[in-house]
Image (cartoon, grey):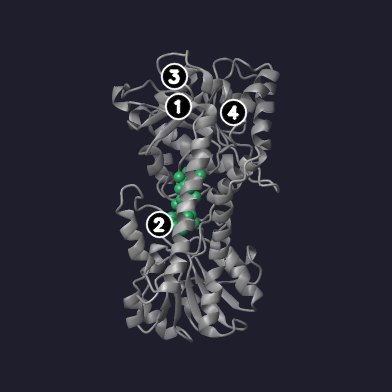
Amino acid sequence: MSAADAGTTAGASRHANGELREADRAAAPAETTPARIGVIGAGYVGLVTGVCLASLGNQVTLRDIDEGKVSALERGDVPIYEPGLDTLMADHRERLTYTLSLDHMLEQSDIVFIAVDTPPTYSGDADLSRVMTVLDELEATGADDRHILVMKSTVPVGTGERVRAELEARGLGKVGYASNPEFLKEGAAIEDFLAPDRVVVGDFEPQHGDAVEALYAPLEARVVRTSVPSAEMVKYASNAFLATKISFINEIANVCEEVGADVAVVAEGMGLDRRIGPAFLRAGVGFGGSCFPKDVTALKQLAGNSGYHFQLLTSVIEVNELQKRRVVNKLKKHLDTLEGRRVALLGLAFKPETDDMREASSLVLAARLMAEGTRVVAYDPVVTHPGDLVHGVLDAESVEAAVAGADAAVLVTEWTSIVESDWAALRETMSTPILIDGRNALDPAQMRDLGYVYEGIGRNGR
Ligand code: UGA
């Protein structure tokens, strides 16, 4: 138990014995005075956080070390693809400042969000070097007791306590600290920020948590106030649980294929049980992205470092890796050999509405097919030059161009524009009409009526 968990004396809003306490948002003031907010790291999380907080009326200074990014932001260019972000940024430009200077950001702000990368290291631990660099910089620049650091980056449980100790060691013991994990889905980040299921705030001293909670008051969201380690754990546990749900339904899909059941119906039937819920029960070619693979591995590693073998997560990761490759066997079943065949991959990003290719299932699939000697032609509405990511993959400018002359097509990412293609016309251009629906996004009966040899994931016989 941490020092914060043990604390019971720090005021009315404090949790007792480490248990989560949900603050009743209805009792909180709906209006707050605008805050002066700094954000360190204008990446995906930092930018969305900064722009959304500006949209709530706060003055926000975003600081990044990348000169190109800062000047792009100053010009009004959004360096990432996130629906709605450009409009929100433009609408609130008078409350948004971008800078390279930490000094300037500290002058302009009281509450400072840390939103730097914490990528996995070779050991599977999260790399905290960027967080530590920020602390070095804060020491050099001179943060003071006016400042509250708020950790938005996903960091291993225990990081807050480590940061506290590092601040003390640097003579910055008066700087406040709170943990406020992000739960943003790429492609829906603005909505997730402005209409969250919950806001989690962990603190060592309640006045710091109060200041962070006040920022979210206009959203009238459920707020969970807790200790810093518990807040850090909520983030990891949430992502690990969602990833587990996906691997679980993927395994159910694989069994459905063996026994002649349809996973879409099975998932619907399961999801109607309120204890299970319908979300994250879509079977497919596995989860990807910058969060699930990284966080599941980091939680497994974190447990291992403390002497606990998190067996379930080991399986979640393994099931996901195998799931990415299952399409290859499906193709082999229909084409005998993949050598010299032309296969179209439709959709490359790890999910629709993003240009993010990190840990995308398409990468593993493309590489596996290339290793089989297949000619891979790929199309994505946003991601271009796939050959830069997997050597030899050909870039197509449209679904039509990718599919023309192909021996098989694989729907990898369910972009609406791809799902809504003219499948009847596409079929006519294919060498053989084999269609593998890696996201169960198409209607099997309709595709078969159009003459496709259609296979989804776990949709045997339907
Ligand atoms: C995920 C979480 O959903 C967010 O709550 C969290 O804040 C974020 O990670 C993070 O830690 O920053 P994200 O990675 O953007 O968000 O994407 P998701 O929409 O969760 O999808 C992740 C992957 O799971 C995708 O590859 C998607 O195709 C796959 N997935 C999702 C399925 O295969 N089946 C499903 O039913 C749902």
| Residue displayed at 36% across by 27% down | 217
Q: Which residue is mark 2?
A: 281
Mark 3 vs 4: CB contact within 8 A: no
Q: Is residue 81 above or below residue 375?
A: above
Residue 276 in percent (x, y) is at 36, 50
| 375 displayed left or right of 49 | right
Q: Nearer the viewer, residue 378 or 157?
A: 157
Identified by mark 3, the residue type is Arg
**Classed neighbour count for the residue bearing mark 4: other residues with Cα under 10 Å, few (<14), some (14–19), many (≥20):** many
Q: Which residue is mark 3?
A: 14
Closer to the eye: label 1 or 3: 1
Q: Which residue is mark 1?
A: 19
Task: For ligand 1, tell me if the residue under mark 2 lies within 8 Å.
Answer: yes
Q: Secondary structure at mark 1?
A: loop
Closer to the eye: label 3 or 4: 3
Q: Which residue is mark 4?
A: 160
Task: For ligand 1, tell me if the residue under mark 4 lies within 8 Å.
Answer: no
Of callouts 1 and 4, the N-terminal one: 1
Of the numbered discs in the image, which one, if any, rests on residue 364?
A: none
Of callouts 3 and 4, the N-terminal one: 3
Q: Secondary structure at mark 3?
A: loop
Closer to the eye: label 2 or 4: 2
